[in-house]
Amino acid sequence: MINKVLKLNDNLINQIAAGEVVDNPSSVIKELLENSIDANSRKIQVYIKNGGKKSILVIDDGCGMHKNDLINAFNRFATSKIEKQKDLENIRTLGFRGEALPSISSVSNTTIKSKQSNYEGHKLEINGGTQVDLRPDSIHKGTSILVENLFYNIPARLKFLKNDNSEYQKILKLFKVFCLSNPEISFELFNNNKKVYSFPSSDLKTRIVNLYGEDYKKSLIEVNFKIDKYLITGFVGNLSLVRKRRGHQFSFINGRYIINHLINQTIYNTYDSLLQRGEFPFYLLNIVIDNNLIDINVHPKKTEIKFKNEMQIQHAIKKSISQSLKNTIKVIPSMFVPRENFNNQVLDLPFNNNISNDITDEKIDKMFTDSTLSLQDNVKVWQIHNKYIITEISSGLILIDQHVAHERILYEKALKSLEGDGLNAQKIMFPITLNYDPEDFNSLLDIIPYLNKIGFDIREFGENSIIIEGSPPELLNGKEKEVISEILDNYIEHKQLNSSFIDYMAATYSCKAAIKAGDKLDDSECISLIDKLFATKHPYYCPHGRPIIVNLSISDLDKRFERL
């Protein structure tokens, strides 16, 4: 009889385990950074090549390892961080499973150098899980680990890696998380021998500003709240930091980055009366909680968590955010005046997208009795409250919302330019320089050709910066950054250069560039606006589905005055 159930060899076990812990270069870096932080490092450097696929090098100045520990660290389930089952209830380190190093070394060429204080340093080389060399080394302090040719011995997994740029994007996101969760540690990141980030040791607010720019300095609201067994600290952003995409939301529990829907939704709900649908606030919360109230031993990636009492943590977070947001003057951006109802407090907020779901061209046509709207000779026009234009047509009266009318005109013009040769830019007397973090800049490069087509004149200018030398003629000076930021947020959120993105670009530009409610127009400007509106394909509704024209026929007026 042939035995069919056999114990796998250690090398194959490690390769299978690697699938749980290591699935791309950023997951390798995550495990190595966690080890460096657990080693009480004060300075950590990361070097990558080809999006981490060719090589990853992490250097720290932590406590290092003795020769025997260095060897044992590459045995599966060997760890210095827990000893017995009870230790799982009080984990105080980022790593604890003892799977990362053997898993990484089993699918790469790994070289590690390490020195523990008062002992000689050593260098260990492992290829595909097999030790090939161990010798003394002159490393001065801490640990240096080089991972090369990831998945070279597992072609099936190698082919699922994305292109270099996509893997690099994942690393940038991950690196930010560690920089924000450990501001007291100095971090550096190098990509293909080029320095990307360099952050000295600092406090949390300084680290946030260093990462995202000076605009954040005045827009951060401190959170410092203690209730029962929960201590919640960090920062939330006022409405100046609200974005149209996710990505600037960070939750840390006992120093560990956590992705948790309950926490996210609780925070969004707390902001609910201040935000429009599809907007996301900035927040970074450090939550300190007794380890016996949580379970992080849910998944090898250690980003998931279970709470012993979800209602308690939800209440604590809601209270902490509410307390920080209670002074609404701080929450509202400086250019806006607070009102009793925050839901519609800002002029020119994005229109209700739900309107457009039900509207079709056919339905719109049925809404208007006069299908050939044409101005009569010697027409008279009036501007009402610097917001609406009223004029006489052959069948009665029409009222036009000047903002959405101009928006429709610009929208169709922008769509045509995006599909054709583009608009000519109007030169700016004083060019504008915009700086971005490397992750956002990498995405911005994808959409610059589209921005140039709607009338911007943009080129790269130094590291992670652009210079705007021209802008669309219709766009007011000072609006350039706002338009580009909204379009970039949409692209980063959806990562699709398709017709929906083109439509969003045109709609965003037209909304920002259009004349506003409150702008005074003379008679000739009113007439020009109406003529241009009637020349569009769809003059009855704006790109967001909001009506442009209200038509009052003679019959409607007669009924109102009881003539019929």
Image (cartoon, rainbow, N blue to C red):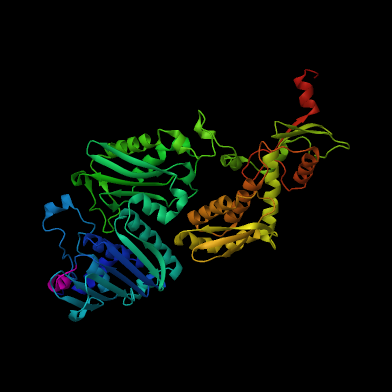
Q: Quadrant of residue 119?
A: bottom left
Q: Position of residue 27 (x, y in %)?
A: 32, 64
- Total marks in image: 0
Is residue 22 in view?
no
Report the quarter where the N terminus lies: bottom left
Q: Which percent across, then down, holds residue 36?
A: 25, 63
Q: Nearer the viewer, residue 372 or 202?
A: 202
Left or right of 177 in this view: 452: right
505 over 520 or under it: above or below: below
The answer to whether one can see residue 166 in this image is: yes
Give left or right: position of 311 versus 364. Answer: left
Q: Which residues are magenta?
A: 64-72
Question: As rendered, which of 313 and 45 lies closer to the eye?
Answer: 45
Picture quadrant of residue 154: bottom left
| Residue at 41% over, 56% down | 211
541 sits left or right of 82 in the view: right
Is 163 left or right of 381, judged from the image as shown? left
Residue drawn 36% across and 34% down? 323
Q: Tell me the quadrant of the picture where the C terminus can be found.
A: top right
